Amino acid sequence: MAKYYNKIIEQKPSTSGFVKTEEEKVLFDLYKLNSSYDEMIDKNKQPRTHCYPMYDRLLKMSPEEMEKRHAFAHGDFLRQGITFTVYNDNKGTERTMPFDFVPKVIPQKEWHQIEKGLIQRFEALNMFLDDVYHDQKILKDKVIPRDLIVNCPHFFHQVAHIDVPARQHIFMAGIDLIRDEKGEYRVLEDNLRNPSGLSYVFQNRYVMRKVYPELFYDYSVQSLENQFSKIHASMSYLAPHQNPDPTIVLLTPGVFNSAYYDHSFIAQRSGIELVEGRDLVVQNRSVYMKTSRGLKKVDVIYRRIDDEFLDPLEFREDSLLGVPGLVDAYRAGNVSILNGIGNGVADDKAVYHYVPDMIRYYLGEEPLVKNVDTYLCRDEEQRAYVLEHLDELVVKATNASGGYGMLIGPHATGEEIEKFREQIQINPSEYIAQPTINLSSLPAYKGDRFAACHVDLRVFIFGGETPTVFPGGLTRVALKEGSLVVNSSQGGGAKDTWVLQDEEVDHQEEGEQSHA
Amino acid sequence: MKFEVSQTNHYDYSLPVKQSINQFKLKPIDEGKQRCLSYTATIDPPSETFIHRDYWGNAVETFYLWEEHDFLTIDTNSIVEITPLEGIDEFTLSEEQKMAFQTFDFRQEYAEFLTGTDYTHLPDEILHEATDELWQNSRDPYEFVKMLNAYLYEKLSYRSGATTVKTTAQEVFEKREGVCQDYTHLMLALCRYRGIPARYVSGYIYIGENSALRGDAATHAWVEVKMPGWPWIGIDPTNNIIVKDQHIKVAVGRDYRDIVPLKGVYIGGDQTLAVSVSVKKSEES
């Protein structure tokens, strides 16, 4: 375990890495730091302590070698068929998510803080969901405006009063984190419906280990090996009637869905059946799966179909993806649906503004990981401010996802700004605004050099007996230099995310000063 | 007043049907001045029903018919007692009550009933056009509601078959004809626009000897409005009356979607539905 720490000490007196070799000139001399926080290189152009061995390794790799490996890694993704479909581009194209091999490395101490903060958030969000679908205490106590919740398009009165197993509405949360100019982590967005991307986390690691094995030599990275058995245990724990041996299925809309790869990967790796709506039936308030040996009772459904399409009896009657009667079986307590129906009311972009208040209200604690400041356009005063500062702010439509329906003021044309101004004035409650945050950056490989590209981090939190944070995550990178949009549908790529095991990392926070 | 209400919904299928799942909201609500003294629902082919209360307080029953069948009958029978709300023909809202409409707390408490829905959405121009004059000429929101009631009664022609269950308030405003559901949706839109909480009510109307009252085979829909300091008050724009004790409430919600009396999903042939309703004054006292 002391491997990593020792290595640093060992290297400290030596000059390797500080000597400008040819490669370094090529690859890092052109590395431009901007006003954002760079996670690898500090203001004095020196690698941060925990990145030191990585930096050193990168310098030792020749440009030819890098090029070769880069092509190999890319080919690996294609061969495995790891793709996603881009909506709204009319071509219905499947793309691979571009992969950048410089990983995000998270020291243990930093990770502990993230873990604590996200579990706190996860618990408050879950209590909020249980509350708004039962007694609505938080609304009665006027902590959150009632109309924002009950008139939210993702608030589904159909699931009011339903007691879900273990009162857990969230099985898997995907919380997006960014780091501000000071390097402080902040929550950008909560995803409590169907967060995707978990399969990429595994694939990124797989490719990374295969193509860049030596980068791991200096680090003790937390393994992802056993995670699927933990995920399976979480699903089992949430089964109705505390059934110790539940039948679990993953319900997918089918192969044409953009995240189908994610669905099939998770089903396969956690050892559960992958089914479509037509494979399930509801009879007398229980759900059954059609098998070659007749009907088999299903206890847990990890669904990757949106709420509105789940049950034509209670939601959209034109849905062919869902299962008639599913909500009634859920209501009867005979099946668990993960994530819970109606979770969208807690990850709505306007409701996000109130998550810190939820934490204070339900847990009596101060939020450990802060939000990004948010202006609600539904509020007259805040709207006035937003309309006056459109060129500085990021404006988001509350009901759009994936970077669509977004205005990045400083990068927008006058025409785009005017279009948003008009939209905000017509439907103020459908917009929120946030200051433009210079997301932190990490080096990304650009063929002949490294460029500082903006990143964010999706962290996955799982419910179950005790909520746990998945030791890794999906680091998304805006590969277009200067771009702040990291969404894969908008040209973003991914990086492997390393959570370090070594307790010794704690000491290195102090060591950083001596490098600087 | 006490009523015996019975309703029969009979489906015939062109081809046998199986794996049928159905949901109905037919039980008269037990709320305010209305008491549901007894209620039974009988399904044929026989099936157990599972009951739950929805977000709006309505009783919802679900049943499953797995095996093949070529007809389906749902029979409901209930005895309902209604005490009319006193003093609702004529009252004036105090200044304080008038102010209450605009308060944050009031608007929050009735948030669901102040918002537009797919059925009630109308463009601002229409909302203005339809309500400006009435609003200016009324001394308080309650008078506005009564004037609006008369206005819609005059403005729209009652014609069964002119519209469908999917017709929106905007279509009704443009066509100027419809049935009780259409009168109701349009009135909901106009009340909410003026900040008056309003909800959709489905139920029955007792026509009795008074054949002047309109209602399609006695199943009916109307509006309830909320005045500060008052319970929900029923307003029936199809008949231009204030609801007393001849309207039997079954379900309430934001619009038709929340109160759909009967729906189902099944595998099999086309269906034809026959509905018969009877509302009688109860002899027992």
Image: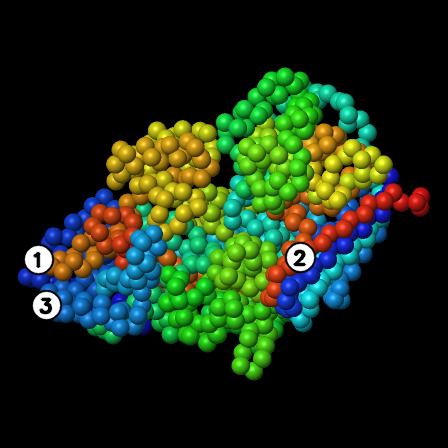
| Same chain shared by disc 1 and disc 2 | no
Residue B75 spot, x, y in % from top left: 78, 57
From the image, tell me which residue sits under label 1: A25
* Chain letter behind tag 2: B
| Same chain shared by disc 2 and disc 3 | no
Q: Look at the numbered disc 1 and give the secondary structure of its residue.
A: helix
Depth check: give the residue in front, A458 or A273: A273
Q: Amino acid at mark 2?
A: Thr
* Chain letter behind tag 3: A
Point out the tag, 3 or 1, that comes first from the N-terminus. Answer: 1
From the image, tell me which residue sits under label 2: B272
Mark 1 neighbour density, 10 Å: few (under 14) some (14–19) many (20 or more): some
* Chain letter behind tag 1: A
Depth check: give the residue in front, A422 or B173: B173
Depth check: give the residue in front, A85 or A207: A85
Q: Residue furthest left?
A: A22
Q: Look at the numbered disc 2 and give the secondary structure of its residue.
A: strand
Residue A318 shows in this picture: yes
Q: Residue at x 67, y 71 (%)?
A: B68
Quadrant assignment, res A299: bottom right
Residue A251 spot, x, y in % from top left: 49, 67
Q: Residue at x 76, y 54 (%)?
A: B8
Q: Residue at x 18, y 54 (%)?
A: A451
Determine whether, in the image, residue A293 is placed left or right of residue A101. right
Gap in angstroms between the C-alphas marked 1 and 2: 81 Å
Q: Residue at x 74, y 66 (%)?
A: B45
Residue B53 shows in this picture: no
The colour scheme applied to this rendered structure is rainbow
Q: Amino acid at mark 1?
A: Lys
From the image, tell me which residue sits under label 3: A64
